[in-house]
Image (cartoon, coloured by chain):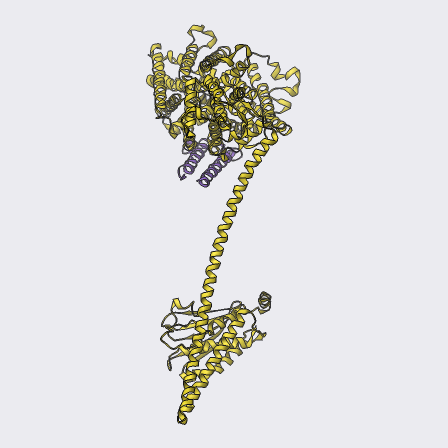
Chain colours: A purple, B yellow
């Protein structure tokens, strides 16, 4: 159980690192441009998309653990 | 038309519902059936993070800085990913030590220091009170705006209103009453407030629903969805700019520091610490909150930008404050009910924050500021008072009232000034100062009290100088010269360009310098000072929290003598005599004792009493109080070190034991395998012996039988005699061959065989072998085909031995072929780095299962019990040994009824492999 718990923790920490990189300079400067996709501003869409992805990843890591 | 009484009664009805929920929650908690013991409730209550600053202020921020408001919510999302390690550890430490506030946490970690507890409390109060003012302002503003429905009138400056007509004053008073009722109903040893948490979770739901409702209304009711709003924004250059962040280093820097700041705030804002750590029912609830809380933040932020853009489009002249768009947009569209719902949502955001924050602050003020002073104040004779629990509650209630009044006074003083508007982030930056002492405290044993005090003081001072004082100056309370010219006119001391640092926004600037000062002093002073006994033991308990057992390990560090009749009244004075007796009785029962009298006042009990007391008055004061009734023999630093060493030795020893037992297991498994192998070998040897004797006996029997006939019957005629003698000779030959092969086998196996290695020509060997066996072929009239590739190089091997192998394979092939119809093919081919020889026959073939046995000694295919054995059973094993000696291999391919192909391959580069083989043999 302890081992599983550590694996879950590592998955979450990886999600943190991924989010930290995706939400900050320089990655964010790539989408910090005027322009729209499906009528939604690019940066707005990008941030909420990554945000949803992170929540999904964390939920996956948490809810599939068996302890 | 919304009348004042409608809004007021809606507000009171809402507060009434909160009361009811809180009351019900407390009742259930008393009955032992908690309604908040649920991860979803826990996650919802964490959303107390979203105050009116989120509910109204996010839209305001989005209207001025566009998408730049988001990092304040991205930070907590990211931090949630680290909660699994960090928050869990803090929760576990806090539960073990009955920690009731963030000040208590820091004080306990650094040797239960009253000074440190007080310092943290002061920083928190200074940093948070303006933030409480902000909530009061938002609530009263929203009330005033709604009162003028359907007209949209911006509230006049608060200062313009007479005191008794100021809705903010009433808001403050009502909230104080509510907080006092549910925050200090009784003194709990763990300082938990289940009813309050239930109400907070409910409030989180209300503000989310209200915000989503107005978001959907603006986006889909006033406009035609996201695309429509963003399309319209695209047409206005000022709005278009909101969709991106200015592409400058400063704005990316601000983005980063806001993310970082909010990561720390979600951990260390007193209200967050209260809800996530102190009020935590079960640490397992944390797991679900790790993704549910970010989801909440996600949902409450989706509509912020559309509402901001919608508001700016709707009120283009700037007469309406963007902070009020959430409320004024529904009002402008004459949506009475929605406007009221928004107002209630804002009310819930504000009250939630105020209630939790004041409870957290009042606990800190009481335990870490007031009690230490009162207890030292000898003339008050508190030491002689029998029951102090009433006094404690009174202090807390007063603290709540005072904090809210201070908040109100600040609100009256600041009004619309910058000092209030910008306070959200300024507060965040203040509580961020706790981060080094706390993170250092739970991961670094070397952090000392002096280090923590130095770090906090330095960080707080830099924060005040670079953020708080400038905000006062911008509000007109201080001369602006101090910002423009620097302190005493020294340019390097300009508070927002300290030491000439430019290129950062004010928050990033302050965060950088304050963190540099804080961490720098914390580390430097910690490294220069030696921790005392209590610091060392507490440091170990905190850092190794995950390694401690269930029973608090704190008692290891206490030695002395105590009396139960001293301890019990002491605890009783603070918790009330009844509760103290109950707690002691529960402790006695856990130890299997019938009554309190049977308790022995040992280190464990003293520790238990101190922890119990810590829940009521904080760790630092609890230590002082307990020390006043027990005789502690102070442990020397050396002794503490010894205990720690012992503990780590025990740990190391048990690790070694585990390691040893694992090794032992492995060794046992190895031995068992070796034993099995030995038994197998023994069995094989027995088999070998019995087979050899059996094989020897067969020819011997027939030799003896024929010899006896010849001896006993001299009249046997000559033909018979010759026949018998021929048999005898043949059997003798067979005997000799058998014995030779057994000896040969033994020699090869023991490595004593003689090898005459030379360059040999396989073609020549095959031809010679075929010639030697040609009579066998012609006797049984079996056909023989030979095909040999030309230009075959020589291999290094023993010529005679290879002939032996060939003869064996050829005679086997003949043996198993039917007379007349038999056919044998011999091939020599080059196969990569090997030369391969195939001997193929069309005999009965060998079953899959038998193929591996035929290379074992004395194994012959077929039923050896009935059929006469057709060979010695040693030929193939010997051949295989020979081929393998020269680095080659010998195998068979066959299936029943389809003949068999025996092949062996020898490597071409005999030079090297041959040497290796020889060196191996030595």
User: Where, by quadrant of the figure, is residue B299 drawn?
Assistant: top left
Residue ID at (55%, 41%):
B652
Of residues B876 and B323, the one drawn nearer to the viewer in this rendering: B876
In the rendered image, is residue B503 in sight? no
Of residues B485 and B693, the one drawn nearer to the viewer in this rendering: B693
In the rendered image, is residue B120 in sight? yes
Q: Is residue B525 left or right of residue B171?
A: right
Figure quadrant of the C terminus of chain A: top left
Total residue callouts: 0
Residue ID at (54%, 74%):
B792
Of residues B423 and B267, the one drawn nearer to the viewer in this rendering: B267
Of residues B887 and B327, the one drawn nearer to the viewer in this rendering: B887
Measuring from the top left, give residue B68's x and y in whole percent: 49, 26
Measuring from the top left, give residue A39's x and y in whole percent: 41, 32
User: Where, by quadrant of the figure, is residue B509 drawn?
Assistant: top right
Q: In this view, does A45 lie above or below B510?
A: below
Measuring from the top left, give residue B371's x and y in whole percent: 51, 16
Measuring from the top left, give residue B869's x and y in whole percent: 40, 76
Residue ID at (60%, 17%):
B483
Q: In this view, does B239 lie above or below B378?
A: below
Q: In this view, does B901 lie above or below A44?
A: below
Q: Is residue B197 above or below residue B697?
A: above
Question: Residue lying furthest front in this view?
Answer: B598
Figure quadrant of the N terminus of chain A: top left
């Amino acid at each position: 159980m302890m081992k599983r718990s550590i694996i879950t923790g590592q998955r979450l920490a990886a999600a943190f690192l991924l989010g930290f990189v995706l939400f900050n300079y320089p990655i964010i400067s790539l989408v910090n441009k005027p322009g729209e996709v499906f009528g939604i501003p690019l940066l707005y869409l990008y941030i909420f998309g990554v945000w949803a992805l992170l929540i999904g990843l964390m939920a996956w890591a948490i809810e599939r653990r068996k302890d | 038309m919304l009348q004042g009484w409608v809004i007021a009664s809606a507000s009171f009805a809402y507060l009434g519902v909160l009361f009811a929920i809180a009351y019900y929650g407390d009742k259930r908690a008393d009955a032992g059936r908690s309604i908040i013991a649920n991860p979803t409730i826990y996650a919802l209550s964490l959303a107390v993070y979203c105050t009116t600053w989120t509910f109204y202020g996010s839209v305001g921020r989005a209207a001025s800085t566009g998408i730049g408001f988001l990092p304040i919510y991205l930070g907590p999302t990211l931090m949630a990913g680290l909660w699994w390690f960090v928050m869990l550890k803090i929760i576990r430490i806090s539960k073990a030590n009955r920690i009731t506030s963030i000040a208590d946490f820091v004080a306990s970690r650094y040797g239960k220091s009253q000074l440190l507890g007080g310092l943290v409390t002061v920083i928190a109060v200074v940093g948070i009170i303006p933030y409480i003012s902000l909530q009061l302002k938002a609530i009263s503003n929203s009330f005033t705006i709604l009162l003028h429905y359907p007209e949209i009138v911006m509230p006049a400056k608060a200062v313009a209103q007479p005191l008794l007509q100021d809705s903010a004053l009433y808001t403050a008073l009502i909230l104080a009453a509510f907080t006092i009722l549910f925050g200090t109903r009784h003194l709990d040893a763990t300082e938990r407030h289940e009813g309050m948490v239930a109400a907070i979770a409910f409030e989180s739901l209300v503000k989310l629903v209200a915000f989503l409702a107005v978001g959907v209304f603006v986006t889909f009711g006033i406009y035609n969805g996201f695309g429509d709003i963003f399309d319209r924004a695209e047409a206005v250059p000022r709005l278009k700019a909101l969709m991106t962040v200015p592409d400058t280093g400063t704005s990316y820097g601000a983005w980063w520091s806001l993310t970082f700041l909010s990561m720390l705030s979600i951990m260390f804002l007193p209200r967050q610490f209260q809800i996530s750590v102190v009020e935590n029912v079960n640490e397992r609830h944390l797991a679900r909150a790790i993704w549910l809380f970010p989801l909440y933040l996600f949902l409450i932020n989706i509509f912020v930008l559309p509402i901001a853009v919608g508001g700016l489009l709707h009120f283009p002249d700037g007469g309406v404050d963007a902070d009020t768009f959430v409320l004024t947009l529904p009002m402008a569209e004459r949506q009475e009910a929605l406007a009221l719902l928004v107002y209630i949502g804002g009310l819930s955001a504000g009250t939630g924050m105020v209630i939790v924050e004041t409870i957290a602050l009042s606990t800190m003020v009481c335990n870490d500021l007031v009690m230490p002073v009162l207890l030292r104040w000898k003339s008050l004779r508190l030491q002689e008072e029998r029951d102090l629990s009433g006094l404690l509650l009174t202090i807390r209630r007063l603290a709540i009232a005072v904090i809210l009044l201070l908040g109100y006074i600040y609100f009256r003083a600041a009004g619309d000034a910058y000092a209030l508007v910008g306070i959200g982030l300024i507060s965040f930056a203040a509580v961020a100062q706790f981060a080094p002492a706390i993170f250092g405290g739970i991961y670094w044993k070397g952090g000392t009290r002096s280090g923590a005090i130095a770090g906090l003081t330095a960080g707080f001072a830099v924060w005040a100088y670079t953020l708080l004082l400038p905000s006062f100056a911008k509000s007109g309370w201080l001369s602006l010269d101090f910002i423009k010219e620097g302190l005493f006119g020294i340019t390097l001391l300009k508070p927002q360009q300290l030491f000439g640092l430019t290129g950062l926004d004010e928050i990033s600037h302050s965060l950088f310098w304050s963190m540099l000062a804080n961490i720098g002093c914390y580390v430097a002073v910690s490294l220069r000072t030696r921790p005392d006994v209590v610091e060392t033991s507490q440091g170990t308990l905190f850092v190794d929290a995950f390694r401690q057992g269930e029973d608090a390990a704190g008692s290891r560090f206490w030695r002395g003598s105590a009396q139960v009749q001293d301890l019990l009244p002491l605890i009783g004075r603070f918790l009330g005599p009844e509760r103290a007796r109950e707690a002691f009785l529960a402790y006695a029962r856990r130890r299997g004792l019938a009554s309190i009298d049977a308790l022995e006042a040992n280190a464990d009990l003293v520790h238990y009493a101190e922890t119990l007391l810590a829940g009521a008055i904080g760790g630092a004061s609890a230590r002082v109080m307990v020390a006043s009734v027990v005789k502690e023999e102070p442990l020397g630093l050396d002794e503490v070190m010894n205990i720690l060493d012992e503990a780590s030795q025990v740990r190391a020893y048990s690790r070694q034991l585990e390691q040893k037992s694992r090794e032992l297991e492995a060794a046992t498994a190895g031995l068992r395998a070796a034993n099995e192998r030995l038994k197998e070998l023994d069995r094989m040897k027995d088999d070998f012996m019995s087979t050899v004797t059996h094989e020897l006996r067969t020819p011997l029997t027939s030799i003896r039988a024929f010899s006896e006939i010849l001896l006993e019957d001299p009249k046997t005629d000559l033909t018979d005699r010759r026949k018998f003698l021929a048999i005898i000779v043949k059997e003798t030959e067979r005997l000799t061959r058998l014995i030779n092969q057994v000896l040969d086998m033994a020699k090869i196996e023991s490595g004593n065989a003689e090898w005459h290695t030379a360059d040999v020509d396989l073609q020549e060997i095959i031809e010679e072998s075929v010639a030697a066996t040609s009579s066998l072929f012609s006797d049984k009239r079996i056909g023989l085909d030979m095909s040999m590739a030309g230009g075959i190089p020589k291999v290094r091997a023993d010529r005679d031995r290879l002939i032996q192998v060939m003869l064996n394979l050829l005679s086997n092939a003949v043996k198993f072929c039917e007379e007349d119809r038999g056919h044998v093919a011999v091939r020599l081919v080059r196969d990569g780095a090997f030369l391969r020889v195939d001997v193929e026959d069309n005999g009965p073939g060998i079953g899959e299962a038998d193929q591996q046995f035929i290379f074992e000694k004395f194994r012959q295919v077929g039923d050896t019990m009935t059929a006469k054995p057709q060979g010695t059973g040693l030929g193939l094993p010997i051949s295989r040994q020979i081929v393998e000696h020269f680095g080659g291999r010998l195998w068979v391919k066959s299936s029943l009824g389809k003949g068999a192909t025996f092949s062996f391959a020898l490597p071409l580069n005999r030079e090297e492999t041959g040497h290796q083989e020889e060196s191996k043999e030595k």
